Amino acid sequence: MKNRIKMRKAQAWLLDFMIATVIASMVFGLILYSLPFSGDDAGMARLERSLGTLSSALISEGQPENWNRNDFIIPGILSEGVVDKGKFLELSHASDFRLRESLGIYPDVYYCVFFRKHDVLIIVDNVLFVGSENCFEDDLHTAALAETRIVSNGTELISAVFKVWKE
């Protein structure tokens, strides 16, 4: 008789233990699920921030409005709402360090800016793009891209493409 009572108590404790284990596992899983992921998600967030600052700064008149490659706070490529070829060329000659500093681009992030119309690249006075060397490589591991339509030559619409990536 005593053995039967002990067996029933053990069975009751086993059931309590199983329920507690299931509840603890669910709580642990919910905590892990709610934590932000590091790695790719964090890297992509950094790329998106860099892309946002790059595009919003360059699609402006810049500060000061008549900046040059050695003297600028924010290098914008527009003048009176139209792409300024001279500003784009000045941008191509500015130091990479100075551009990164003014645009808030992280040191481990590569970037480039180029123009195209109907998927045809536009060359501005022998300058195809501004930014990091391997702008047109296809095997970039993690990249973010933004494209905006802007006015060139007074009435012509072209696309300004902003690209950031990590290797």
Image (tube, rainbow, N blue to C red):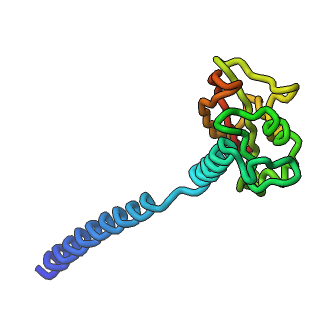
Q: Is residue 96 left or right of residue 143?
A: right
Taking 31 as reference, is 152 above or below it? above
Q: Position of residue 12 (x, y in %)?
A: 19, 73
Count of marks overlaid on the render: 0
Point out the residue furthest to the left here. 1
- Comparing 18 with 124, the one in front is 124
- Comparing 61 with 41, the one in front is 61
Which corner quadrant of the image does residue 77 belong to?
top right
Q: Is residue 48 left or right of residue 122?
A: left
- Comparing 78 with 116, the one in front is 78
Q: Is residue 41 left or right of residue 130?
A: left
Q: Position of residue 57 (x, y in %)?
A: 67, 48
- Comparing 7 with 153, the one in front is 153
Who's the residue at 61% across and 36% down the image? 146
Quarter that holds the C terminus: top right
Q: Position of residue 80 (x, y in %)?
A: 66, 38
Q: Position of residue 30 (x, y in %)?
A: 38, 61
Who's the residue at 74% across and 21% down the image? 121
Who's the residue at 69% across and 27% down the image? 152
